[in-house]
Amino acid sequence: MALEVIRETLPPEVTVLRIRGRITLGRDTRQLAETVSELEREGITRLVFDLGEVSYMDSARLGILTRCTISMRNAGGAFHLAGANAKVLQLLKVTQLDEMIPSFASVTEACRAFGPLVP
């Protein structure tokens, strides 16, 4: 199954990337990296990766999560994960990324965790 990335915006002004498939080293994952680069150029500061339909993620692709975290923090924002399965959560724990990237059971919870948008 090819990796699919669907972008949407949910309240409170949170960009959500709904990701479907396997996140592994290879050509398909370039689309995800390109989308993240585009978000950085747009100045997005609230980002959620919806991993609810990600069946597998290899350790080679953890760099994209680290990149998002650093990019969002440098822009004064934050990066959250939502819906990760047990295997992905275990990978985050083993690499200690779970201490750096907040993870939530649902996209709704991840979006609410940002709090209201302050003008």
Image (cartoon, rainbow, N blue to C red):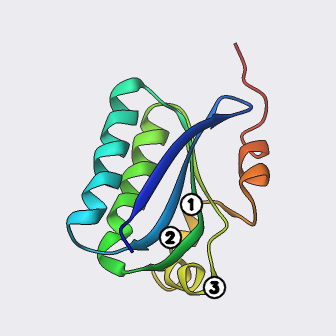
Residue at (67, 67) in percent of width and height: 83
CB atoms of marks 2 and 1 within 8 Å: yes
What secondary structure is found at the residue carrying circle 1? loop
From the image, tell me which residue sits under label 1.
101
Q: Position of residue 93 (x, y in %)?
A: 56, 81
- Classify 78 as above or below 117: below
Q: Residue at x 79, y 53 (%)?
A: 109
* Disc 3 to disc 2, C-alpha distance: 14 Å
Query: Label 1: few (<14), some or many (≥20) within 10 Å?
Result: some
Q: Is residue 31 left or right of residue 22?
A: left
Find residue 78 and report its horizontal and vertical position in percent: 57, 43
Query: How far, Cα to Cα, is label 2 from label 1?
Result: 6 Å
Note whether 4 is above or below 115 in the view shown: below
Q: Quadrant of the N terminus?
A: bottom left
> Crowdedness of circle 2 by 10 Å Cα count: few (<14), some, many (20+)?
some
The image quadrant that residue 98 belongs to is: bottom right
Q: Of callouts 3 and 1, which one flags the residue occurring earlier in the amino acid sequence?
A: 3
Amino acid type of the residue that numbered disc 2 sits on in the rendered structure: Leu
